[in-house]
Amino acid sequence: QVTLRESSPALVKPTQTLTLTCSFSGFSLTSGGLCVGWIRQTPGKALEWVGCIDGDGDKFYSPSLKTRLTFSRDTSRNQVVLTMTSMDQVDTGIYYCVRLNLAADFFDYWGQGTLVTVSS
Amino acid sequence: QSALTQPPSASGSAGQSLTISCTGTSNDIGEYKYISWYQQRPGKAPKLIIHEISRRPSGVPDRFSGSKTGTTASLTVSGLQPEDEGDYFCISYAGNNNYVFGTGTKVTVL
C-alpha cells in the first residue's frame, strides 16, 4: 500500500526558509519512472506545481519557483525534503506531497497535505 | 501559465450522467495527451480517477470516463452515485517539466 505523509504544519516568518519533509512507504523511489515532490494549494493561485525529485536524484522544478527551491532525498529512509527560500505571505497554503508517474505525467498518489502559514 | 477553466459547480440526480469540462490552450491540453482527473472528497487526499485523457486506474469504476477535443478535456460520470459528491479537478502537462491545474468543480448529487 502506497502512502505519503507530509511533516507537521509549519509557521514561518516572511523572508525565512521553509523546510518540509515527505515520508513515503509502499514503493522504492529508485525502482524507476517515479518522482516524489510537491503540489501546493494557495488562496491566490489555487493548485500549483512545485516540483519533484526522482530516483536518480534528478530534480524537476516549477519554472516560476525554481530559483527558490531545493529538493533532496534520503532513499534509505524513504524521504524527500523540500527547501523553499524567501517565503512570503502569498506562499501560505496547503502543501501536498505527491508521487508522479514520469512516463505518463500523472500524480497517482497524494498525501493529506500540510498547512504552511507565512506570517510575522 | 493560466489555470485550466472548469465550471465551479455541477449537479445531477442519482443515476443520471454528468459531464465536467476542462478548457486549456494549444500549449497544454491541445498539445499533450497527458491529461488527468482527480476526485477530492472533504477532508481527504485527492484521488486519481483518469489519466492520459481516458485511462482508468485499477479500482476506479467504469462509470468514470474521459475524453478530449481540441483544447477541452471532459470527465463524464455515468450513473451518478451519492459517493461521487466532492471536488473534481483536471491537470495537464504543459511542457518544460511544468503542469497546469484546473480551477475545480464541486459536484453535488441531488
Image (tube, grey):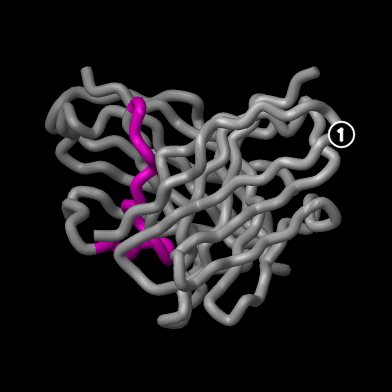
Quadrant containing the C terminus of chain A in the rendered view = top right
The answer to whether residue B5 of the structure is visible from this angle is no
Q: Judge by depth and name the residue closer to the eye, A31 or A81.
A: A81
Residue that appears at 17% across and 27% down: B82
Report the chain holding disc 1: A
Q: Is residue B35 above or below residue A89?
A: below
Quarter-wise, where is residue A67 in the image?
bottom right
Q: Is residue B54 magenta?
A: yes
Q: Residue at (51%, 35%) from the top-left corner?
A: A8
Quadrant in the picture for residue B83: top left
- Is B20 placed left or right of B28 in the picture? left
- The amino acid type found where label 1 is placed reads Thr
Instruction: Locate the N terminus of chain A by quadrant.
Output: bottom left
Residue A4: x and y in percent read 40, 52
Q: Is residue B7 magenta?
A: no
Q: Which residues are magenta?
A: B42-57
Q: Is residue A2 visible?
A: yes
Please report the residue visible at 13 percent of the width from the left and 32 percent of the height from the top.
B15
Label 1 crowding class (10 Å Cα cut-off): few <14, some 14-19, many 20+?
some
A48 to the left or right of A36:
right
Q: Nearer the viewer, residue A59 or A80?
A: A80
Residue underneath mark 1: A15
A119 relative to A75 in the view: left or right: right
Secondary structure at numbered mark 1: loop
Residue A107 in percent (x, y) is at 45, 58
Tell me residue B37's x, y (percent). 41, 50
Which residue extends farthest front?
A76
Q: Is residue B97 above or below residue A114?
A: below
